[in-house]
Amino acid sequence: MSYENILVETLGEGARKTGLIRLNRPKALNALSDPLMDELGAALQAFDADPGIGCIVLTGNEKAFAAGADIPTLAQHDFMSAFQTQLISRNWEHILRIRKPVLGAVSGFCLGGGCELAMMCDVLYAADSAKFGQPEIKLGVIPGGGGTQRLPRWVGKSKAMDLLLTGRLMDAAEAERAGLVARVVPAAELMAVTLQAADTINGYAAPVAALIKQLTNQAFEVPLSEGVKIERGMFHAVFGTANQKEGMDAFLNKRPAQWPQP
Ligand code: DAK
């Protein structure tokens, strides 16, 4: 499939490769238009369905991961049209249905819907140039892509309120301290570091990575005692897989594991 608002490629040397998606509307700082979100959903689903792909990396360009939803489109709406068309709701959550790990690599502006999209990734790596924020209040609106719900879960209530209510931007160092990003690296190293992490994950058994993703994300949805119970059941279940047999036999025999392909 050919795309106009994203760039898609497959990278890596191992048996399982990385699916790389670059948001690509540079003139609008990668503002997340409807066509872009449609293409993003299609590319994510295609990589998820491809057994040759381990991880997916989502990134933008040096200047912006994404500066938010497309403001000229939003500006055309009133309540009735927003309500009746379910304004930009249709294609925003495809990413949440992806079973493979999705790694976000953030440079430059990551604002509004851009920050909300980043928070739908499983882990974020940031360039030292990255700037995060939910500036919707400056436009006279509230976040609509989950910002008021996910930001407190990533960074805690006080920091989230500070960002949401003042609309100020947070730099990469602060984002790392707050737990929004896993690692901050010099801008020139961002893709190498992210792709290295993806390669490492690609080298493990794919169903095990998918289970870890599912359980970790579930930690934000269910009470602790329930989450631990579900984890316990899954822990027992993996002993019925060839991955457990191979991983533990490889350790005991001091050899690299050869994961069975799913
Ligand atoms: N949309 C469209 N175009 C944008 C844009 C955006 N969000 N942000 C920037 N641009 C465009 C600018 O208009 C400009 O275009 P030209 O004038 O050159 O044609 C170009 O990108 C470069 O921007 P600037 O000239 O402004 O560049 P600066 O470096 O001076 O400033 C900036 C960069 C990021 C600080 C500034 O552009 C800015 O404040 N941008 C707006 C940031 C913002 O307010 N973002 C939140 C938008 S509201 C939902 C899901 C999501 C959402 C809602 C609902 N559902 C699932 C229901 C999300 C809503 C939002 O994101």
Image (cartoon, helix red, strand yellow):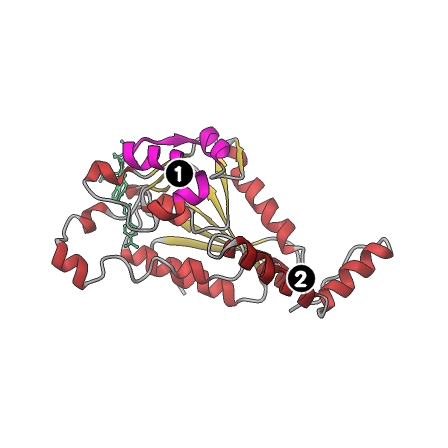
Q: Is residue 155 visible?
A: yes
Residue type marked 2:
Phe
Q: Residue at x 32, y 39 (%)?
A: 134
123 or 35, which is in the foreground? 123
Tell me residue 67's x, y (percent).
32, 41
Q: Is residue 162 magenta?
A: yes
Q: Secondary structure at mark 2?
A: helix
Q: Is residue 188 left or right of residue 170?
A: right
- Earlier along the polypeptide chain: callout 1 or callout 2? 1
Quarter of the rendering occupied by the C terminus: bottom right
Provide the residue span drawn in magenta.
151-178
- Which image quarter: residue 44? bottom left
Q: Is residue 159 left or right of residue 164?
A: right
Q: In this picture, is 186 found above or below 87?
A: above
Residue at which label 2 appears:
235
Residue type marked 1:
Lys
Residue 20's label in the rendered image is none
**Most distant residue in the front direction:** 225
Residue 157's label in the rendered image is 1
Q: Residue at x 33, y 45 (%)?
A: 148
